[in-house]
Image (cartoon, grey):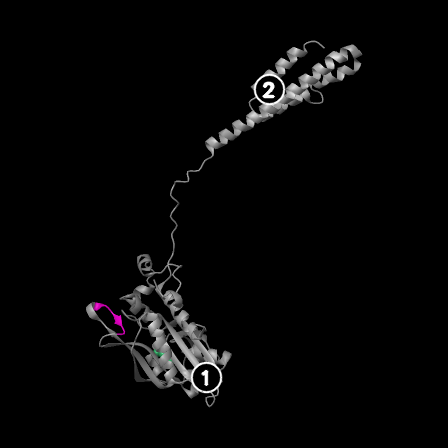
Amino acid sequence: MDGLVELKAVVLKRILEAVNQEGLENLRVEFLGKKGEISLKMRELGSMSSEDRMIFGPLLNSIKDEVNLALLAKRAGLDDLALDERLRTEWLDVTIPARIRATGSIHPVSQVIDEVTEIFSDMGFSVAEGPQIESDWYNFDALNIPSHHPARGEMDTFYMANSKSANGAPNVLRTHTSPVQIRSMQSLGAPIRIICPGRVYRADYDQTHTPMFHQVEGLALGKDVSMANLKWVLEEFVKAFFEVNDVELRFRASHFPFTEPSAEVDIRCSWANGQLRIGEGDDWLEILGSGMVHPKVLEASGINPNKWQGFAFGMGIDRIAMLKYGIPDLRAFFDSDLRWLRHYGFSCLDQPRLSAGLSR
Ligand code: PHE
């Protein structure tokens, strides 16, 4: 058992010099593993005389303990070094400004549809929708516009070349939202209170007309729903939509095949310095067509005209959007010009709420 002290010195020196955990582990195996140098020496104790064992036993044990302690200390030291290295190399500069993310905006038409929906749902109307490709029956016949009727020609209808309805007539791109009235009466019956916002199509194009535009239809049926109710509902709508306290509406006698009597509705306004003001001044501005639903229309929708009556109206959404937000040219609505969309668009957080004032 010579050289124990030298062995200890060598082991401790090599532990000190280890540069990583792997090297350290190799050292542990080399000296303290099953066939390690110190372990082998421990085994030799068995064949010693008891006097020798009394000397070398404690000596070997203390060397083994010292080596174990040195291994532990070195392991912790290497861990600290590794951590220091990571802290030095892996770091984030949290002061760097975040990357700019492009955000879209809500189109004024979508915003106005949300505003209109908010106002009418407060008055008990729910939203109904229908297809944009319609049969001529829903778009015309059911609305008391038979095939010889001049209104068919006036509407600048787009006819579908390859799409026919049940009676063999070509389908049309709906020219108004009124066919949704028919569909809703058929499926929901009476009483009913709905609005139907959506796209409509007419072959027309200038500063105030585009071949696709938007309307919102209104329909209310009950046992005693009258023109008086129509007037109140429209007044409440206009006040809430244009955010004015008072407004004067003018009902002008008019004609639609699907309403009797019919009225076009104007609101009082002024155009001082090219700025539109709603509710004051000497001008009138047409905003919608309306009337009492024609008995033939009720019949076509399976509703008994002797039991039910009510009003309907149809309003141009793009039109009232232009008026409210001062947008001069309708065609720009559908140009998809990003500069226009950023200027006139709304934030997605700008959700219209009656309780909070409708708009920004
Ligand atoms: N559908 C008519 C149009 O597009 C508007 C309207 C709807 C008129 C309902 C009266 C009643 O011009």
Question: Residue 8 occupies which quadrant of the picture?
Answer: top right
Residue closest to the eye, 141 or 169: 141
Q: How many marks?
A: 2
Residue 277 seen by the camera = yes
Residues in magenta, as a range: 274-279
Q: Position of residue 310 (x, y in %)?
A: 42, 84
Q: Position of residue 68 (x, y in %)?
A: 65, 22
Residue occupied by mark 1: 222
The reply, left or right, for residue 134 in relation to residue 286 is right
Answer few, some or many: residues within 10 Å of disc 1's Cα (few below 14, many 20 plus, some between 14 and 19).
Answer: some
Q: Position of residue 57 (x, y in %)?
A: 74, 15
Residue 15 is marked as: 2
Q: Quadrant of the C terminus?
A: bottom left
The reply, left or right, for residue 207 in relation to residue 193 is left
Residue closest to the eye, 20 or 230: 230
Say whether residue 218 is magenta: no
Residue for point 75% across, 17% down: 43
Residue for point 62% across, 23% down: 71
Residue 136 seen by the camera = no
Residue closest to the eye, 233 or 133: 233
Type of amino acid at the residue the image marks with label 2: Ile
Type of amino acid at the residue the image marks with label 1: Gly
The reply, left or right, for residue 297 in relation to residue 75 is left
Q: Find out if the beta carbon at label 2 lies less than 8 Å from the nearest ligand 1 atom.
A: no
As measured in the structure, the alpha-carbon distance from the residue carrying label 1 to the one carrying label 2 is 96 Å
